[in-house]
Image (tube, grey):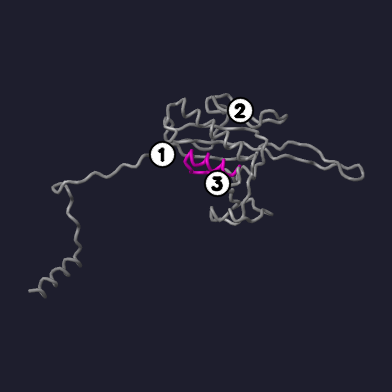
Amino acid sequence: PAAPCPAQGSKQQGRCAGAGQVAAGAMKYSREAENSTKSCKASGSDLRVHFKNTCVTAAAIKKMQLKKAKKYLEDVLEHKQAIPFRFFNGCIGRHAQAKMTNATQCRWPKKSCEFLLHLLKNAESNAEVKGLDTDNLEIFHIQVNRAQKQRRRTYRAHGRTNPYMSSPCHIELILQEKDRAVTKGEEDEETKRPKKIFKKRLAQQRSQALTAA
């Protein structure tokens, strides 16, 4: 029930799949969830989107809640927020929006955001199928790996050619239900443990009692 992949329609399209589909089943994840019954997966292989931009964008949404991550990526597409470039940041310009994430350099990688947004929606659909609480999901693991480069050529002067390579990537993603905070119950006066008093404090109390007397 997931939305169509942004790669569809291009000649060099990648494979986006959920955990139950063939492409993701063949893909080995670098990390497993702590509780498989409370988590879901999604992955994409050989996606025609720049590795470096996607890697930086994935780092920006790591450990975020699902709803917050989706809203953040949608804001980046509308240029309301920016992706901070803390690595792979050679020749990256500076902008005032980077101050929102305590960074200096930032950009708005449109294609990377679209692919990651699609993958999050795919994982959310898998979570609904498993009966998980989608409002309580967070990004437990997200990783971007380099894929095999795809070769083209560009034509230069004097009849020469140079390589014109693309840098596709593989993405893997695991969502997990966040543990709910348990409030501490009130203790009875009888069951409450007495506070430990150190020797130094006892000596101070004795000296205060003697001086008062």
Query: Type of residue at label 1?
Result: Lys
Q: Are marks 3 and 1 in contact (CB under 8 Å)?
A: no
Q: Please, which residue is most extreme toward the left here?
A: 213
Q: Specify the farthest residue to the bottom.
A: 211
Q: Which mark is on residue 4?
A: 2
- The region drawn magenta spans 61-77
Cα distance, mark 1 to mark 2?
28 Å
**Marking on residue 178:** 1
**Residue in the image at 60% along x and 30% along y:** 16
| Secondary structure at numbered mark 3 | helix
Asked where in the image residue 163 lies, by quadrant, the reply is top right
| Secondary element at image label 2 | loop
Quarter of the rendering occupied by the C terminus: bottom left
Name the residue that disc number 3 marks.
Answer: 60
Secondary element under disc 1, as helix, strand or loop, is loop
Label 3: how many Cα within 10 Å (few below 14, some 14–19, many 20+)? some
Q: Nearer the viewer, residue 35 or 176?
A: 176
